[in-house]
Image (cartoon, rainbow, N blue to C red):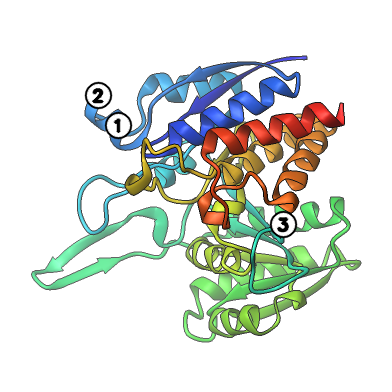
Amino acid sequence: MKYTITLVPGDGIGPEVTAAVVEIFKAAGLQIEWEPYMAGAQALLNYGTTLPKALLDSIEKNKLALKGPLTTPIGHGFASANAELRRVLDLYANVRPVRNLPGVPARYENVDIILIRENTEDLYSGIEHVVVPGVVESLKIITEKASTRIARYAFEWAQRSHRKKIAAIHKANIMKLSDGLFLDCCRRVAAEYQEIKYSEVIVDNASMQLILNPGQFDVMLLENLYGDIMSDAAAGLVGGLGVVPSANIGIDYAVFEAVHGSAPDIVGQNAANPTAILLSGLMMLDHIGETATSVRIYKALLSVLAERKSITRDLGGQATTTEYTAAIIQALEDEA
């Protein structure tokens, strides 16, 4: 089957790691016509906006996008193009599987956690202003609609995936109205799924429990800010953001992305690790029903990681991006 998919190479190392995925997918026999468009810092320079209309039109037409990392300035400058893209396309569910990979050094073994994060509101609504000089107010927006929607998505996902437990992460002991509303919505949805064990964990305790014993968590259901923080923390348990994928799912559109940074310090050195964006691409293949091909590529990736002969420097090897990509393609061909 032929597909047309929007490709956002991104900033920094983004073009290098997305090019690796394009090459691997082609070697796997996938017939994909990629529509590349800029976003983020480079798009702002060229078009005066971080999300050009042509990019949004392409995603709206194709329903799918694969996106590399985008740069977001800290404390000044333009707003996050990542957050804005999620809001504009109503990509309300962020899904981040966190699992150990063979050959990747990690602090824990047998980690297998799915973090499902509400993706459109909370403090990420971007509503903040100066009250008086020296005083800034940021508004945390929590709605019944968004909370119920993400809770239902999490329980439906868990049911399809044969997951047994969901833990809702909150701070309702302090934010009794906002996080309290989130929990009320989670509880109502949980009552419809009696086969799934539901629990609630205060976010600071959840952070400690994640470090003490990550195996106790199965699916974690989180508001936007907690989800952002906890998913990065969880990635640290299995080797970092360079080996963890991410999906942003809405009713009409889906964008799959690497959540690591744009790594300007290694741009152009052929040293970037494409694992995270490749795994995100495999989530995209599963999303469109290309599961058999996704499994083939995943097995090839795992064999290269386990062998450790052709892995990038961040994973403890000496291979270039090109050599790592070639090794995965060779493993695909050997398996055929």
The answer to whether residue 332 is above or below residue 72 is above
Contact, mark 1 vs mark 2 (Cβ under 8 Å): yes
106 or 172: nearer the viewer: 106
Contact, mark 3 vs mark 1 (Cβ under 8 Å): no
Q: CA distance from mark 1 to mark 2?
A: 6 Å
Front disc: 3 or 1:
3
Residue 46 badge? 2
Q: Which residue is mark 3?
A: 101
- Which secondary structure, mark 2? helix
Q: Which residue is mark 1?
A: 42
Locate residue 266: give its quadrant: top left
Find residue 83 and report its horizontal and vertical position in percent.
42, 47
Locate residue 217: give its quadrant: bottom right
Identify residue type, mark 1.
Gln
How packed is label 2: few (under 14 Cα within 10 Å), some, or many (20 or more)?
A: few
- Residue at 63% across, 44% down: 310
- Quadrant that contains the N terminus: top right
Would residue 129 be found to the left or right of residue 79 on screen?
left
Contact, mark 3 vs mark 2 (Cβ under 8 Å): no
Find residue 48 and report its horizontal and vertical position in percent.
23, 28
